[in-house]
Amino acid sequence: MAAGNEIEIRPLTVGFGAEIHGVDLATHVDDGVLAQMRHAFGEYGVIFFRDQRLTPEQHIAFAERWGEINVNRFFQAVEGHPRIAEVRKEPDQRINIGGGWHTDHSYDVAPAMGSILYALEVPSAGGDTLYANMALAYETLSDGLKETLGGLRAVHSSRHVFGAAAATQATGAKSDIAGRIGNPDAVTQDVVHPVVIRHPDTGRKLLYVNPGFTLHFEGWTPAESRPLLRYLYQHATVPERTIRFHWREGSIAFWDNRATWHYALNDYHGERRLMHRITLEGVPVQA
Ligand code: SIN
């Protein structure tokens, strides 16, 4: 655990997802260790830590080593800590946060770089998170489809998820999410991003559409876009291109929002699951 030590990187699969051992994130992380983590983050897309004990201040301090923190405009914040978003589901609630494939903040002009999710309370079983590999999703397409996608851009939005229309659908299900997600006036304009982007650090090509926030291809109607988007979503989420992370109290997942999608499974009704999430600012994505 001592600062300056080599960390141990245990890949979960070939090239996607890795657990990092031998570091205590509650302490100041040595620059050399941070550099090894950065390398693993670029190589594996999502890195995991086990058995950590972080105060909100320590969580923030670790996040700040990676970049500027994004203050989430829709999620309930942890009391006294506006920069930490709460990802909570109570035993009497049915809807979870993030319960479908998506990547955070693709609806922003400069989508978030990544998120650091820390587990405080987990159900006795269930509540795992799935991750999908957007580099592999792109690389395993045919040359013909890669060429087509290389010329396309897509429209992304938060309206249908966090906007006023979504918030005022007064069904029992929607009211269940009230108090955890809010502030519909903070929905900004829709944005357009290339469908294939280059990772700003590694230069690797990535598929950059997602089921949560992508509406349609630019210049195509939603109906025209749907079949191809559906194909891409199915292609990206086959088991070979995904991993499943089982949480324990004190686990941390740190994912790259450009290189991955994630999906919080909602299979633990009747139990509490409580996580703290810090999201880091990113840069505009480019082809
Ligand atoms: C999220 O979408 O950020 C939540 C992920 C999770 O709770 O596992």
Image: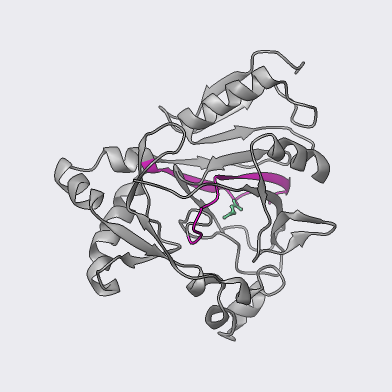
Q: How many marks?
A: 0
- Which image quadrant: the C terminus? top left
Q: Nearer the viewer, residue 196 or 137?
A: 196
Residue 42 appears left or right of 275: left
Is residue 34 placed above or below 221 in the rendered structure?
above
Is residue 76 placed above or below 10 in the rendered structure?
below
Is residue 203 placed above or below 158 in the rendered structure?
above
Farthest residue toward the left? 144
Q: Say which residue appears at 42% left-offset and 28% top-offset.
A: 15
Q: Find the magenta span and give its range.
A: 107-134
Occupied quadrant, residue 23: top right
Is residue 190 placed above or below 240 in the rendered structure?
below
Occupied quadrant, residue 75: bottom right
Q: Say which residue appears at 40% left-offset and 57% top-offset.
A: 210
Residue 63 appears left or right of 211: right
Q: Say which residue appears at 37% left-offset and 65% top-offset.
A: 155
Residue 253 visible:
yes
Residue 132 part of the magenta-drawn span: yes
Location of residue 54 in the rendering, given as x and y in whole percent from the top left corner: 79, 38
**Colouring of the image:** one colour
- Which image quadrant: the N terminus? top right
Residue 21 visible:
no
Residue 232 appears left or right of 169: left
Location of residue 80 in the rendering, given as x and y in whole percent from the top left corner: 85, 57
Residue 256 part of the magenta-drawn span: no
Q: Nearer the viewer, residue 150 or 134?
A: 150
Residue 44 appears left or right of 150: right
